[in-house]
Amino acid sequence: MTRAVGIAGLGTAVPPKVLTNKEIEKTVDTSDEWITSRTGIKERRIAEDHVSTSDLAFEAAHEALVSTNMKPEEVDLIIVATVSPDMIFPSTACFTQEKLGAHKAAAFDLGAGCSGFIYALAAGSQMIATGLYDNALIIGAEVMSKQLNWKDRNTCILFGDAAGAAVIKPVEEGKGFLSFYLGADGGGADLLSLPGGGTKHPATHETVDKGLHYIQMAGSEVFKFAVRIMGDASLEVLKRAGLSPEEVDLLIPHQANTRIVDAAVKRLGLDKNKVCVNVDRYGNTSAASIPVALYESFEQGRIKPGDNIVMVGFGAGLTWGSTVLRWA
Ligand code: ACO
């Protein structure tokens, strides 16, 4: 059995607290001008101390269920894509399931860096296509701010907190996800990581003194990889769907850096009004960035039935993922 699967409802959660570049200027040696020109970021959202990733995941998922007219008890599966889980275990998906009261749902986390939402869409949609489940909540959720060294100007300016959720379900044949392309290059694992607290570097006073519990990144290496892969992954997934770049109605790229997005747009030869960019307001929210951008595009009336939407991301791993979605 295979059946077409698409998105039936969307939700987001962004913390109310805004942290501007101007405010960061006061704590590290950087400037609004540097951050804006190198990344396109102007501000980001920061979760309050008591808020964890599953709180944002819950809020986004709840909105997605309401918009789909679904009750939590009807949810078959919850996948949370995240690199900032509540704990190493149990999964953030299990905390989210409990908060929702989605007691029938199977629940697990998926770690593929900022590509996590696309990976999770691929995993969940295959389980529905083959008949294992009839619906799934796919969530990208992050509280990156608690994993950043706020004294490291190379990383602290880049990230923000958010969650985005999608309910996926069977849709009319010829609509929904037309193709996926997922990839990984573990050879680049050290370029972007949070090394402390796992089994390789269990948490000790020494690991904390060395700052191994913070995100570490070789920014310019990741940048080069991202510029190449965003174009490659978009073209490959379009090929798999039998479409050309001219047939793309909307590109939703991972929101890391406007220079990376611009390179992908140029490679595809797309008009700028066919691209969603909100990195200026949220920074890089890792696995949450694509669902939040999709949600905002929908709310702004930029998506109509039959549109071909390309979503593409890259991230820690290194990983990449892309999909073509024909809106149902
Ligand atoms: N303010 C001022 N100067 C800074 C700052 C800052 N915030 N950060 C770095 N610099 C300095 C550096 O120290 C360096 O100085 P030096 O030449 O004296 O050593 C100089 O600026 C240039 O640094 P570069 O790293 O070459 O700057 P670049 O143009 O590459 O921009 C950036 C850096 C924005 C990080 C870029 O490389 C980038 O966006 N990389 C991709 C990062 C990314 O997307 N990561 C997330 C992946 S997704 C995931 O899975 C979480």
Image (tube, helix red, strand yellow):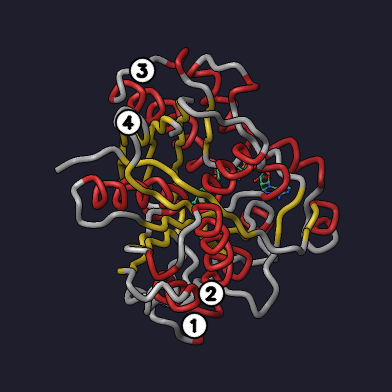
Task: Describe residue 122's horizontal placement relative to residue 13 as left or right.
Answer: left
Task: Describe residue 56's horizontal placement relative to residue 80 as left or right.
Answer: right
Disc on res. 206: 1
Dots 4, 2 in contact, CB < 8 A? no
Q: Residue 127's x, y, as percent?
A: 24, 52
Mark 1, residues whose alpha carbon is within 10 Å: few (<14), some, or many (≥20)?
few
Disc 4: which residue: 178
**In percent of the image, x 47 and y 51: which residue is there?**
166
Residue type at mark 4: give it.
Leu
**In percent of the image, x 72 and y 42: which residue is there?**
280
Instruction: Look at the image and tell me whether residue 131 can be seen.
Output: yes
Q: Residue 313's x, y, as percent?
A: 45, 40
Dots 1, 2 in contact, CB < 8 A? yes
Per the model, the C-alpha gap separating discs 4 and 2 is: 46 Å
- Of the two numbered discs 1 and 3 in the rendering, the one whose residue sits closer to the viewer: 3
Dots 1, 3 in contact, CB < 8 A? no
Per the model, the C-alpha gap separating discs 4 and 3 is: 10 Å
Per the model, the C-alpha gap separating discs 2 and 3 is: 49 Å
Per the model, the C-alpha gap separating discs 1 and 3 is: 53 Å
